Image (cartoon, rainbow, N blue to C red):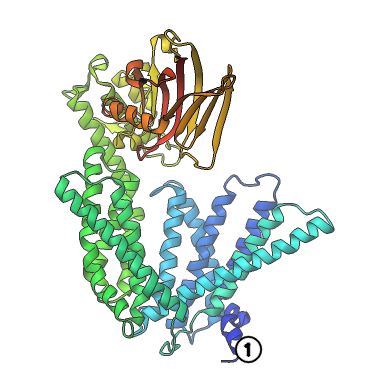
Amino acid sequence: MKFEEKFKNLFPDMKKGIGRFPVTVVFSLILFIVAIFTIESDFYILPEEDLWIKYLIIAIPLSASVELVREKYLENKRSNFFRITSFFGIFLFIFFLKIFFKNHFATETINITATILIFYVLFYLIPIIYRNEDKEKYLQSVVGNQMITIGFSIVLFLGLSAIVGTIDVLLINLPNTIYFDNFVFSASIFGVAFFVSRLKEKDESLKDYNLPKIVEVLICYILIPLILIYTAILYLYFVKIIFTLKMPKGIVSHLVLWYTTFSLFIVIMATPITYKNKFAKFYKKYFPLISIPLILLALFSINERIFQYGVTENRYLVVILILWLLFNMIFIIKADVKWVLISFIFAVLVAIFSPFNLVNVSINSQNKRLERILKKNGIIQNKKFINKNNELSQRTKNEIMSIIDYFYNNASEIKRKKIKILGKTYEKPEDFMKVIGVNDSWKSYENIDIQEKNIVSDIALKTDDDIEITKIKGYDYLIYDFSVSYPLDTNETKEIDNNGYKIILKNENLTIKNIQKNIEILNINLNKIANEIYLKIKEKAKRQNQSYVKLPENDLTYLSETKNSKYKIVFYEIHLSEDDKFNNLNINIYFSEK
């Protein structure tokens, strides 16, 4: 193939694409104008300009889907009249959505995102509904065109930015917002027109269409092996659970789901090459079956969290995704790819726009959970509230306050998100808190997600009157508030001079030298000592069921001697990450020379 033909295939006739999808291109132009107006405004003309941009994004996949329907079913009809009607119809539809989404279903942003996803998937679905063959090839071509479009748009943006930057430096000063303008132009005007120009025609044959060789190699010999290795790791964890009889960690559901969703996408992309590649054929045939136990493991993991802490919006979406993946892996993937797309649209409709959507189910679940806690602790008796403030454990108070926080933290976004118990709805958190007798001792409560993980993030020294410094008695010198940040950098050395002594921290080793005598009086592995202290106090700290824990000095002190010194290290602050690793240590070092 000559270079001119290759270039023509890669860079299609954009005029033809604009003529095929004129309404879509017009909406991309309107989106560009509104976005530029928002970027360049010195003040917000409308308080919800960003939302209007999101609503206009809906019009892009919606108008393209409408045009695909016209091509398929109304090709010989009056196309101009249809397009004009669809343009104004889509505008009215968006205005209707703007009014309706404000106070219905989920938050406005979630409603918009779900609508974009539905029309985006419809855009994929419509051309393959009645295709008898090459459905996966068609999807391959659309995904490939998207990747090419993104690449060209990035190059155009970088090129325009380089030109603007040169003009700004050499000729005239330009506002910084012009770079954002370039980005919006590259993504909306150019990106949309370029993409629709590359789309296959309604009945265009895909018999001779093949993925580029480099993409086949990427799928068959890089992505599929990586997926199978990742699968093996998850199966090893599955076996570990069986032998140790320990419940799976909450993060398992996320680790399984996102990789399985991506793997399903690769199954679809690999389907057209299964006839010539045995590895791709093996993957398509067996991976759906292999993935089912892992999806069930994710379901079991999230079910444990729901049983303990009720349904929240995030957990609801995880369950919907699990059921969607399970359905596809069991029934659909060996049949027809169109059902993958149809089932996805159905899942989104149920999750966001049905009476059993994520918000309604979560509100109902958390209200029932709160009522169970109140009844269990005797706060509700005979359908009346009883003040039992002095009899409640701190953990119970934390649990109640976390539920109150769930309901009222984002109350302005979802106005129906209110506590409703014993037939009464509480509009404000104070109203409910007054009824059950909340006082200042309840105020130190944990975020609902931190609480359920039982994570200790900070450990501090507990002393009288909260004075976090101990007496120097028994030692000659004190190095106060020596800070150690993790991860420790093997190439970095921290040095401090203090009263004639040099303190050096390099990698894991802490060294103290007498500068005048040039004698090393202390050389210890600080990381080893820190781990020893943490292992000693870990279970005691977790039993407090708080993220911030205070412990007595004896628990946080390490005593020892060397031939040149005796020393004491007091860990008065230990900061931990969610995976139980050190983020930062603050220590006091007491020592005396011998």
In this rendering, is residue 345 above or below 371? below
Residue 341 place in picture, x, y as percent = 35, 69
Give the quadrant of the N terminus.
Answer: bottom right
In this rendering, is residue 149 above or below 8? above
Q: In front here: 14 or 458?
A: 458
- Residue in the picture at 26% in, 14% down: 390
Residue 150 place in picture, x, y as percent = 55, 68
Using residue 343 as the reference point, say whether residue 191 is left or right of it.
Answer: right
What amino acid type should be assigned to the residue bearing mark 1? Glu
| Residue ID for mark 1 | 4
Q: In front here: 39 or 280?
A: 280
Using residue 319 as the reference point, say whether residue 189 is left or right of it.
Answer: right
Residue at far right of view: 171
Using residue 195 as the reference point, say whether residue 263 is left or right of it.
Answer: left
Residue 318 place in picture, x, y as percent = 31, 52
Q: In front here: 107 or 81?
A: 107
Q: How many callouts does the rendering have?
A: 1
Give the quadrant of the C terminus.
Answer: top left
